[in-house]
Structure formats: C-alpha cells, structure tokens
Image (cartoon, helix red, strand yellow):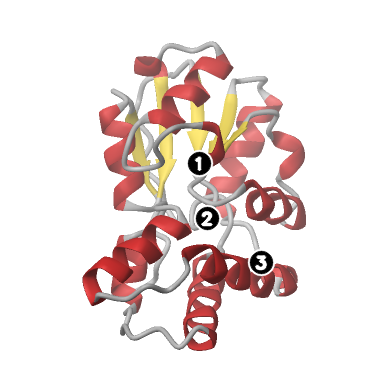
C-alpha cells in the first residue's frame, strides 16, 4: 500500500483504528453478520453498506437500520453480541503495515499522535494491543468521550486539544467516508487509507 502524505509537516497526527491502523474491517463485518443472524434482524445489510458506514458507532447503525426497516431490534443487544464475538476472534487481527509503520516513526520522532475511533474503548484498546500498537498512543478518543461521533468533528477536535495542537495543524488518517467528513468539518487535512481490496 502506497499512501500519499501532504508535503508539509504537521503539528499532530490522528489515526482512526479499524481499517486504518488495524486490518479489522473483515472481522467486524463477520461480527455484524453473526449478531444480525442471532437477533433475526429483518434487513439485508450488504458489505458495501458496511464499508460506507465505517466509523459510525454500532448503536447508531442499528438504530438507522431499525428506522429504515420499521424494526425495533435492541441496539445495545446487537452491539453486546457483536462485541463478544469480535473479542473471541481478536487473535486474527493484523496491523495495517503501511500505516502502523508511519505511526511507529512518528512515535520514535516524539511527534504528537493520537487515535480517534468510532468503536468502543473495549474494542479499540485490545485491537491495538494484540497488533503491538497500543504502546505508541497515550491519547485514545472514542464516542464515549464526545457528544457526537463521526461524521461530526468532535472526536478529532478533542484529539487535537489533548495533543495541544491547533486543529488546522493536524493530519488525519482515515479509511471511512464518515471519518473523512469529520476531518473536513474539523478543518483538518486527511490521508485516505484504503481498507478494502477490490
């Protein structure tokens, strides 16, 4: 994977987790499908829709599907089952080498770096740990830390604040459209990380 980084230097760097630092999207999709089957959901949710919603919190996704299909599936129950299944398969995860190498280099150079993920902390921390990346990051932002998740800019703005870097001086690494929209809303430049090989 070749990533195109802007020519200029930045004051801080913000990394999404799933599909960006960690090659977890295929595992997440399987976890979604398993949970949907367990809950006998009435919808057909395609892989394309899954990738289009990258970065959106689980419960928001379920609520959106409920509204679209006139259903009342419990978002908390779907999330809990998905989380439990995902955690049992954590050992299958690998880092996204190109992005992980950039994060390691920035960490070695003492540049401010952080993670801003749409997943719960209970998923993000073990995912980073099993891929050997957790020790790089002192700052990890998840939806629980803000009022609104991606595509709102809240998580990226909080990451910039905690890194003590102006938002305009941050570069975001993202694989999902909601995350890119969040970066743009925060006034940050971004690098697209393709999380899907097609």
Disc 1 to disc 2, C-alpha distance:
14 Å
- Front: mark 3 or 1: 1
Q: Residue at x 63, y 66 (%)?
A: 83
- Name the residue tied to disc 3: 93
Proximity of marks 2 and 3: CB atoms separated by less than 8 Å: no
Residue 16 position, x and y percent, is: 49, 44
Q: Residue at x 45, y 88 (%)?
A: 40
Circle 2 sits in a helix, a strand or a loop, which is it?
A: loop
Q: Earlier in the sequence, mark 2 or mark 3?
A: 2
Indicate the quadrant containing the N terminus: top left, top right, bottom left or bottom right.
Answer: bottom left
Position of residue 142 relative to residue 108, above or below, is: below
**Crowding near pointer 3: few (<14 within 10 Å), some, many (20+)?**
some
Residue 131 position, x and y percent, is: 71, 56
Q: Earlier in the sequence, mark 3 or mark 1?
A: 3
- Front: mark 1 or 2: 1
Q: Name the disc covering residue 143, or none.
A: 1
Left or right of 31 on screen, residue 181: left
Q: Residue at x 40, y 29 (%)?
A: 154
Q: Name the disc covering residue 18, or none.
A: 2
Position of residue 85 relative to residue 129, above or below, is: below
Residue 5 position, x and y percent, is: 38, 35
Disc 3 to disc 1, C-alpha distance:
22 Å
């Amino acid at each position: 994977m070749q990533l195109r980084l802007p020519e200029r230097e930045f004051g801080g760097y913000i990394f999404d987790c799933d599909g960006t630092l960690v090659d977890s999207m295929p595992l997440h999709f399987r976890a979604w499908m398993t949970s949907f089957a367990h809950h006998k959901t009435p919808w057909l949710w395609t892989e394309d829709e899954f990738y289009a919603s990258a970065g959106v919190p689980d419960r928001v996704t379920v609520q959106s599907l409920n509204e679209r299909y006139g259903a009342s599936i419990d978002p908390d129950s779907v999330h809990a089952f998905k989380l439990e299944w995902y955690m049992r398969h954590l050992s299958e995860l690998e880092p996204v080498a190109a992005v992980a190498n950039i994060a390691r280099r920035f960490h070695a150079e003492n540049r401010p770096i952080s993670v801003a993920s749409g997943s719960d902390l209970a998923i993000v921390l073990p995912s980073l740990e099993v891929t050997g990346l957790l020790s790089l990051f002192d700052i990890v932002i998840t939806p629980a830390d803000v009022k609104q998740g991606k595509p709102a800019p809240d998580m990226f703005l909080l990451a910039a604040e905690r890194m003590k870097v102006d938002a305009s001086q941050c570069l975001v690494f993202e694989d999902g459209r909601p995350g890119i929209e969040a970066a743009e809303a925060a006034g940050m430049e971004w690098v697209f990380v393709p999380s899907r090989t097609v």
